[in-house]
Each structure stands twice: as C-alpha cells, then as structure tokens.
Amino acid sequence: MAEQQEEENPTAMDEPHKLEIPTRRVKNIMKLDKDINKVNSEALFLVASSTELFLQFLAEKSASVAMEKKKRTVRIEHMRVAAKRHRPTADFLLDSLPMPPQSSEQNPPKKGTKSRSDKKPVPFATRSIEAFFQKSS
C-alpha cells in the first residue's frame, strides 16, 4: 500500500527545485567577499534557495502589514514593520532598510506660503531647473 502511494504521489525529493533567483548573480555576490575564491554548486544552490525563502517570507509579512493598514501597495514602511515584528530579521535588516520619507500629514505646510513641497518632488540626485541656470560665482 505504501509503495502505491509513493508511485502516485512523488515526493518533493524526487523533483529538482527550480530556482527563480539567478544563480550566476548570487555567485557573483558571494565572490565579492575576498575570502571566497570558488563557490561549490551545492553551496550556491543552498544560498540561492535560502535567499528565495527569505524574500518570500519578507514579502508575505510585508503584505500582511499592508493589508492590516488597509493599503493595496506594499511600501518601505510596511517592510520595516514586518522586520521589527520578527526579531531575527530585525537584528540584521533594520539598519539596512532606508528610513521612510516624512509624510506631509505629520508636518502640514503653513497656509499662504507656497513652497517646493507643494509641487511634484524632484527625484533623488537631481537638481531643479532653477539651480541649473543660476550663475556659479
């Protein structure tokens, strides 16, 4: 009876796991460490699989935080909350995550004054057109 079940339902051990993450890129990242010259294929597979599982875990937890806040888009704030709730993740990841931008709700602009914040924000590492045409002294 047990043999029939094994034939009908092959186990996950029989089927090779297909990775979604590019292993070549993982290998290049691993080789950034000066102490690593060669990467074993089994070690590469384990690191890539672990990375996929961690990213899946973080995405699921971040999505649940976003749903708790009745949002449809996962933002960096949701990722930070998800990382804070899971202590092992918080220990190494919170310092690497960027701080969320300050919302305009916390610091409302003064009435009657027009500032750059009323307009569309300038992307990071770019200048406004006024700064481009100013004479440098």
Image (cartoon, rainbow, N blue to C red):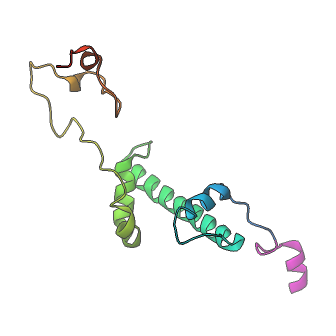
Depth check: 83 or 61 in front? 83
The stretch drawn in magenta includes residue 134: no
Give the image location of residue 6, x and y in percent.
86, 79
Query: Would you say 64 lies left or right of 125 here?
Result: right
Give the image location of residue 65, x and y in percent.
39, 55
Give the image location of residue 37, x and y in percent.
61, 69
Depth check: 34 or 30 in front? 34
Q: Count the numbered circles shown.
A: 0
For residue 6, above or below residue 137: below
Depth check: 102 or 25 in front? 25
State which quarter of the image contains the C terminus. Answer: top left
Q: Is residue 116 visible?
A: yes
State which quarter of the image contains the N terminus. Answer: bottom right
For residue 14, above or below residue 3: above
Query: Would you say 44 lies left or right of 5 here?
Result: left
Residue found at x 34% / y 34%: 124
The stretch drawn in magenta includes residue 2: yes
Query: Would you say 128 lies left or right of 33 here?
Result: left
Residue found at x 67% / y 68%: 45
Q: Which quarter of the picture shows residue 127?
A: top left
Give the image location of residue 31, x and y in percent.
58, 63
Depth check: 64 or 121 in front? 121
Q: Which residues are magenta?
A: 1-14
Residue found at x 51% / y 62%: 57
Residue found at x 21% / y 35%: 104
For residue 75, above or below residue 96: above
Query: Would you say 100 lies left or right of 15 here?
Result: left
For residue 33, above or below residue 119: below
Outermost residue toward the front in this view:
137
Q: Is residue 21 visible?
A: no
